Amino acid sequence: MPELGNWPEATFDARVQALIAEMERLGHPVVVTSSRRSADQQKQLYAKGRTSGGAIVTEKSGEPGDESKHQRGMASDLAFRDPRTGQPSYADTHPWVFRGAQAKSVGLVWGGDWTTLVDRPHVQMPVEAAPRPRGAPADAFMDGVYQEPIQSILQPRDTTGGAPR
């Protein structure tokens, strides 16, 4: 397993690269099939199974407040690489649970553990490990966005440059 040092400090991309390298080493190569998405791309995926054909593939609409971790560069989808064709494969015959365990071993959340919309190809940065301002508690980081403590938002601010009153 590649050494990434302190996991809470490791970047999402470093974790995904560690997962790819480990799966290759273990004889189950994987490839990234989707990572960062625009809001429009997310909206198109959200429409599947709702207003366009196909099955529902995401619970996130891409609208402000309902963004996917893909829109923030904190999620990727990985498929197995078919040994015969070299093409991405989502076949049920691949060791998805094993791949999920490897993802978790490098500090990623695996979508195969979800109960509402199981998403075996999906991995994402855990909330508690994502970057946040120094000293900010983990519970101040919700759904990939730093949430300023409510008391500082509610306190009136001195517009002359002073501290909150």
Image: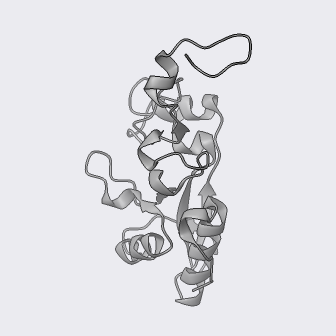
Residue at image position (48%, 64%) is 108
Quadrant of the snapshot with the C terminus: top right
Write down the quadrant of residue 11 in the picture.
bottom right
Scheme by which the image is coloured: one colour
Quadrant of the snapshot with the N terminus: bottom right
Write down the quadrant of residue 96 in the picture.
bottom left
Instruction: Return the x and y of residue 30 as percentages of the image width and height.
Output: 57, 73
Q: Is residue 157 visible?
A: yes
Residue at the farthest bottom position: 26
Figure check: 40 above or below 27: above
Residue at image position (47%, 16%) is 154
Residue at the farthest left position: 115
Residue at image position (54%, 11%) is 156
Instruction: Return the x and y of residue 125 as percentages of the image width and height.
Output: 52, 56
Q: Is residue 126 visible?
A: no
Residue 79 left/right relative to 56: right
Residue 15 left/right relative to 141: right
Figure check: 57 above or below 97: above
Residue at image position (46%, 54%) is 128
The front one of 122 and 3 is: 3
Instruction: Return the x and y of residue 88 as percentages of the image width and height.
Output: 58, 66
Residue at the farthest right position: 160
Instruction: Return the x and y of residue 76 as percentages of the image width and height.
Output: 57, 55
Please tell me how many numbered marks the rendered image carries. Answer: 0
The front one of 165 and 24 is: 165
